[in-house]
Amino acid sequence: MAAAHSSSGGRTGSRCSRRAVVGVGLLCVLLLIMTVVLYMYHIKHQTSITTCTAERETLLSSITNLTGERDQLKSSYQNLTGEYKILQTRYDNLLKLTKWRKNENSFYFFSTEQKTWSESRQDCRERGADLVIINSREEQVRREREREREREKERDDRFVSLLQMFLINQKKERWFWIGLTDEVTEGVWKWVDDQPLMEKEKFWISGEPDNKGNEDCARFATTADGQKTWNDAPCSDRENWVCEFNVTNFRLNTST
């Protein structure tokens, strides 16, 4: 009986051992399956993260590009606005030229009122021009002829209203400002474009310039004889003036 009981106990222990081994094996298989599943999930998750990251970078790049294009369009709009304002100013100035006289490549405006040299130049600059520059003998002759025609026109217009002309011309017009001054350095005469007065361009009246009473601005005498028509005068004097607009210097400036 003892032997039979011992044999039965051995078989029972063997079966338990096998069951334990099978159970452990099953657990290992389950762990392996779970590991594979988790690994595959991890790989898929990482792929999703990589894809999302790439899409995010693409979106960020697109946003950057769109921002750059927006800034370029904004800059282009500002440039066009600036160019429009410049063109509008030039157009307004050209409209004013309808009251000007054309000679060669320049237009000339002869004032009907009197101002100081600085005020006269400011008036010219507001018209998009500057005080006249006489830097050749031919231009000097043209100025003389223009002034003669101006005087003839005034004489022809007097029949319209003698009283009106009398009130306007309380003082007979004899002078007008030109774009020449030595305000910066006494004795060094320069045109308003900062070019120095050349010896061959000088048309001073005999004895001029004499700088009597701080005379730093040049004026054109319409009653002088010949081509010697300039004299220096105090810049604070009030005289007529002539503006010059040179068509060859007409340029658009998109940086003001």
Image: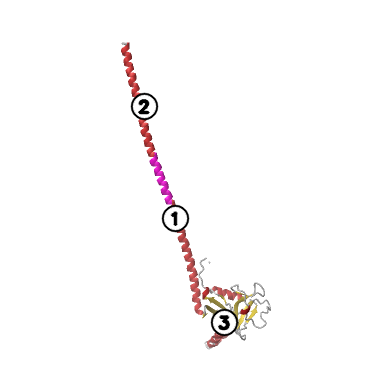
Q: In which image quadrant can residue 163 be found?
A: bottom right
Give percent across and percent down for residue 124. Answer: 56, 75
Mark number for residue 138?
3
As drawn, which residue projects farthest toward the bottom? 159
Residues at discs 2 and 3 in contact (Cβ within 8 Å) = no
| Residue 31 horizontal/vertical position (percent) | 37, 32
Q: Earlier in the sequence, mark 2 or mark 3?
A: 2
Residue 115 visible in this rendered orientation of the protein: no
Residue at position x 35%, y 25% from top?
A: 21
Name the mark on residue 24. Answer: 2
Q: Is residue 110 magenta?
A: no
Q: Which residue is depicted at the point 58% across and 75% down?
A: 121
Locate residue 245, reporting x and y percent.
53, 76
State how far apart marks 2 and 1 are (Cα).
Answer: 60 Å
Q: Which badge, 2 or 1, comes first in the chain's sequence?
A: 2
**Residue, x 55% and y 77% (percent of image)?**
244
Residue 109 seen in this snapshot: yes
Task: Give the alpha-carbon distance from disc 2 to disc 3, as whole Å.
Answer: 119 Å
Residue drawn at 44 percent across, 53 percent down: 63
Q: Are marks 1 and 3 in contact (CB under 8 Å)?
A: no
Q: Amino acid at mark 1?
A: Asn
Q: Main secondary structure of the magenta part?
A: helix
